[in-house]
Image (spheres, grey):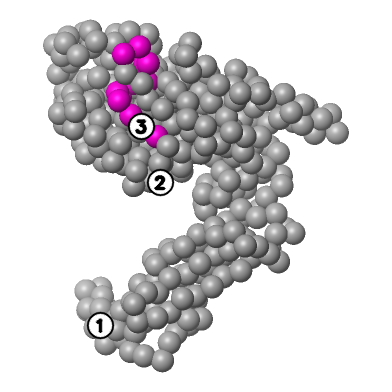
Amino acid sequence: MKKILFILLIIISIKVNASVVVMDGFSGRVLYSKNQDERKLIASTTKIMTSIIALENGNLEDEYIVGKEIKEVNGSMIYVKEGEKLTLNDLLHGLMLQSGNDAAMVIANNVMKYDEFIANMNIKAYKLGMYNTSFENPHGLNDNTKNYSTAYDMALLMKYAIKNSSFLKITSTKKYKVKNYIWYNKNKLLSDYKYLISGKIGYTKSSGQVFVSSAIKDNKLLIIASIDEKDKFNLHKSLYEKYFSLYNKYKIIDKNTLPFIIRENSNDYLYINNDYYMMLKDNEIKDLNIKYNISDTSKYISIYLKDNLIHKEKINSLSYLNRTNKVKQSLLFWK
């Protein structure tokens, strides 16, 4: 009872101007929100996107030479020296653990041209549906350039980022040593909450405390983003416990049985590539509605919770003849 009251107290005491989102890490459905679409400065949580662009366009073993770009930033640093050589893997650990603004500049100037790197951050944001987000730098300082986003958009970004195994490995590392450097993860919730798998904090005077994190408990996946909330670690921990207890994981679509459910009277084999999961309360199952749209021009699945569209996915089509040939080729390969 005391634990429940503590959790409720924490949630009720969320700062009035704070933005908070609790997201289902499988479906992207928002389970709780406060000011979720309000555009705000996001400080060093910018580096989630910086790391993703670097991981998707560079190689972890690549060596970069530290240049004059490190003199353009201040604040949180890993204090690398001009002319020093470090791998992208080293720099990403300095970026995500120690929140090195100098590491961000070295990465952005070496993975590709600096302006191209910033452009790619914004292109990726748009592709992920982060329509209220804009990046002007790779570090999050807001003296001369500013990065804006929302709690909802940052939760979307984390949902995408944790699918990258290298990102997950780096952001869950508590201590990293290279050369004469030792970097410690500033995300204290990694040590205080055993279910946390990833996270990034940020702070400037203008943005306030910013925190984006993800946790897994009993195969349930949640993501939390908070902006301008000082008591960030306690808030995230309490919200995780609350929503892990309220929701369970359900397989909504099974990719193996789907072709038999929606088989049409034609020569096409209809399928999807992956199973689809959602976090639901027990009493919400009855409100779930799955609709299949099968026509000559489009084939897709729509998942509704009551009247709200939660997910829409394209159904792939393959002729039975082509499918049979592919199966035969596969069997011959393994023979």
Left or right side of 162 for 195: right
Q: Residue furthest bottom?
A: 265
| Mark nearer the N terminus (1 vs 2) | 2
Say which residue label 3 marks.
Answer: 134
Is label 2 in a helix, a strand or a loop?
loop
Say whether marks 3 and 2 touch (CB < 8 Å).
Answer: no
Give the number of the mark in front: 1 or 2.
2
Q: How far is disc 1 from disc 3 in space, using C-alphas?
A: 44 Å
Residue numbers of the magenta segment: 133-144
Mark 2 neighbour density, 10 Å: few (under 14) some (14–19) many (20 or more): few
Foreground residue among 261 and 306: 306
**Residue drawn where x is 44% and y is 31% of the image:** 149
Q: Nearer the viewer, residue 178 or 259?
A: 259
Amino acid marked by disc 2: Gly
Query: Residue at 41% of width from left, 21% of height from top?
Result: 44
Q: Main secondary structure of the magenta part?
A: loop
The label number, if any, that marks residue 322 in the structure image: 1
Which of the labelled discs sits on residue 129, or is there none?
2
